Image: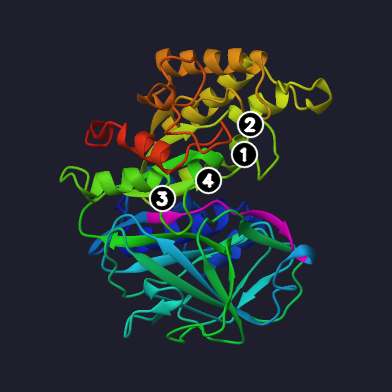
Amino acid sequence: MRAPSNDLRAAHSFVLRSCLVSNWWQGCGRVARRLGVVSAGIALSMALGGAARAQSYTDGYWVGTWGTAPMAYENSIDSYGGMQGVTLREIAHVSVGGSAVRVTLSNEFGKEPLTVNAAAIAVRQNGSEIAPGTSVPLLFGGRAAVVIPPGALVVSDAAALAVKPLSDVAVSLYVPSQPMTVISRHGFANQTNYEVSGNAVAAPELVGAKTFVSWDFLKDIAVKSDAEGGAVVAFGDSITDGAHSTRDANTRWPDVLAARLLGDRKTAKTGVINEGIGGNRVLHDGTGPSALERFDRDVIAQPGVKYVIVMESINDIGHAADPDPAHRYDIVTADDLIFGLTQLAERAHMHGIKVIGATLTPYVGAKYQSAEGETMRQTVNHWIRTSKEFDGVVDFDKVTTDPARAGVYLPADDSGDHLHPGDAGYKAMGDSIDLKLFAK
């Protein structure tokens, strides 16, 4: 049987990403027919290797350079008063550069169709100001406006914007007045973003803009590269999300890793995608869907993903072993968590993605720390260090723990809440990752 053309593979990839990731099954057939992709073709594209390889087009490779994990937010308590006819200018600090971009927008948690009447991407200069001459419209099937069904996401057409590594881009979305009970949002961006009334997607600066610190409707950004470097997904909770790092400074441990990868010629084309959610857990929903629920969407479906670093379990432990028995819920054991982490590793391996296990950082002194929980943490960490489930291990616990006090942060690395690192701790974590893990 003749192999499909690169253009056909691109169409297959768009269908899979828009339909399979979001579980928007009913719409898949209609989209596939419009693109001339039959169900057998979709099955063939899966067999040809999709998620674990950079997506090949006629003149380059598409790889994830930035991403985030949305979750459901009730619009009734939205700070924008219901998102009525506003332009959102959202800032993303990319990892790897490229000659063109594609942007994914999310209505994965919405209850109604989401209309975006106009969108653009530009190089960010400062604040809400974009670099002159860099704003490029984002089109969807050649159209400026797009309607995203409930539970779905959409990928833009390729936009001819050259992006430098470790630079900021501004994605501007005009969201007209419309019914919107639930927003797909990443609530803790730790990044200042901007909002004004009306359609201002092409404005050089949003004068008088309100500011906010979430990423709304923005899922991820891919760039076209001249080399198949692949992407690393950082998958975890608030410690991956960068809680207590300096706002707008991009000092999370995945940011540190991205800069180090860029500085090594063997890994300079490797992107880093941050899929951390503060409060996230492995086995139960809480702040966002559980790791087991969101893994396919936030890891396996990422463009060009080759590696995932998994750092999850501390919130499961904290809630299950809270020092106050009245505050304990969703009780789990260390064996339960090991099972959950094993599931994540096996699912990644099924898609050809290498899995790096990260040990859990200290938490003695945190509000939900207990002796029982510390025993669970040590048990899980021992398993991560010695298990054969992972293709590599990053020992974040070892690098941030005070050698004189087991289970306690080094004072210089502690943010002050004894659970999260500060900027110095995040740098130590990012610096501790062996780049040889990604140069194989």
Residue at disc 4, secondary structure: loop
Type of residue at label 3?
Ser
Residue at disc 1, secondary structure: loop
Image check: 403 left or right of 163? right
User: Is there CB contact under 8 Å for labels 1 and 4?
Assistant: no
Foreground disc of the pair 1, 4: 4
Magenta stretch encompasses residue 306: no
> Residue 215, how many percent across, how many down?
56, 62
Residue for badge 3 = 45
| Quadrant housing residue 92 | bottom left
Residue for badge 2 = 315
Image check: 159 left or right of 36? left
Residue for badge 1 = 280
The part of the chain drawn in magenta is 65-75
Instruction: Quote the CA–CA distance across marks 1 and 2.
Output: 7 Å
Instruction: Quote the CA–CA distance across marks 4 and 3.
Output: 42 Å
Type of residue at label 1?
Asn
User: Is there CB contact under 8 Å for labels 1 and 2?
Assistant: yes
Q: Is residue 36 visible?
A: no
Foreground disc of the pair 4, 3: 4
Q: Earlier in the sequence, mark 1 or mark 2?
A: 1
What is the crowding at mark 3: few (fewer than 14 residues within 10 Å), some, or many (at least 20)? many
Foreground disc of the pair 1, 3: 1
Type of residue at label 2?
Asn
Q: Is residue 378 above or below residue 32?
A: above
